[in-house]
Amino acid sequence: MRSAPIVAVDGPAGAGKSTVARRLAARLGFTYVDSGAMYRTVGLAARRLGLDPADEAAMNRLMTDLGRLVLRTEGERTRVWLDSEEVSDAIRTPEAGEWASRVSRSPAVREGLKGFQRRMGEAGGVVMEGRDIGTVIFPDAEFKFFLTASLEVRARRRHAEWAEKGGESALEKTVEQIEKRDYNDRSRCLAPLSVPPGAVTVDTSGLTVDEVVDLLFRRVKAEPPGGRAG
Ligand code: DC
């Protein structure tokens, strides 16, 4: 029996999941878990070792030898370490996003990270964000949300985030990258991005972050497991 609920937040790249999930967790006093950061770290490791994400034997070995993955939320950011190396910035480049999406098709990678994610969330009191949290990782989550937004809005957000970090790229390139990521994430055989049964879908295109956080917060507070609060 969980002492507090699990909140699953899924959706495509740029739908606003990270910021919303992090702030929602802070407001609820829950732990925030960014599952995408885990795929990004595995993608970075694969790239550095020159491994082919389609080579399942190589992905199996990579997961066995990966080392210790540590995630910590500090204010508005998730810090990530692989063994003693901090990879927080290295995993946030557009290229790392593409590698994350590529390794995320591997059964060995998904299986390895599934165990890690379940251990991090099983006690409850978490907001976990990703692509398959409400479908595969915690299909029994007490609250499931699916955030979405138009392709243009999502590309603009990702582009702005990247520019803020000093990165350079044309908006058209970001649109292309997001379209490719969407296609990869939705078309893979294993745990494809899809709306979990029973999830509340929120189109964030015309909403501010605070409005989305508010909407989710009110749903969680008004509907505790076991019945509606009076
Ligand atoms: O949310 P993000 O952009 O950091 O995720 C990077 C990639 O990782 C995404 O394109 C697909 C993969 N991913 C996944 O397959 N399952 C998750 N639960 C989270 C991310």
Image: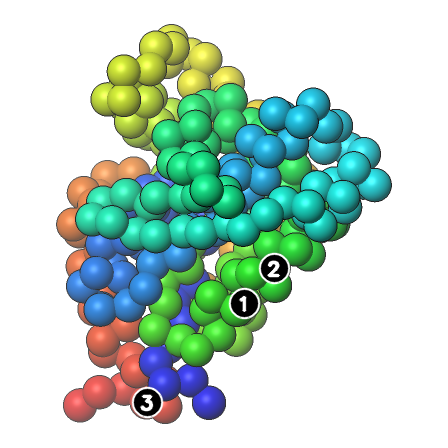
> With 33 as the anchor, is 118 left or right in this view?
right
Q: Can residue 200 be seen in this view?
A: no
Residue 150 spot, x, y in % from top left: 38, 34
**Mark linked to residue 114:** 2
Residue that carries the numbered disc 1 in the rendered image: 118
Q: What element carries label 3?
A: loop
Q: Residue at x 54, y 67 (%)?
A: 118
Spatial CA span between label 2 and label 1 = 6 Å
Question: Between 37 and 102, which is closer to the camera in this rendering?
Answer: 37
Q: Is mark 1 on a helix, strand or loop?
A: helix
State the quadrant of the C terminus: bottom left
Asked if the residue at tag 1 contacts the one at tag 2, i.e. Cβ–Cβ closer than 8 Å, the answer is yes
Q: Which residue is drawn at 18% across and 43% down?
A: 208
Spatial CA span between label 3 and label 2 = 29 Å
Which mark is in front, 3 or 2?
A: 2
Spatial CA span between label 1 and label 3 = 25 Å
Looking at the image, tell me whether mark 3 or mark 2 is earlier in sequence order: 2
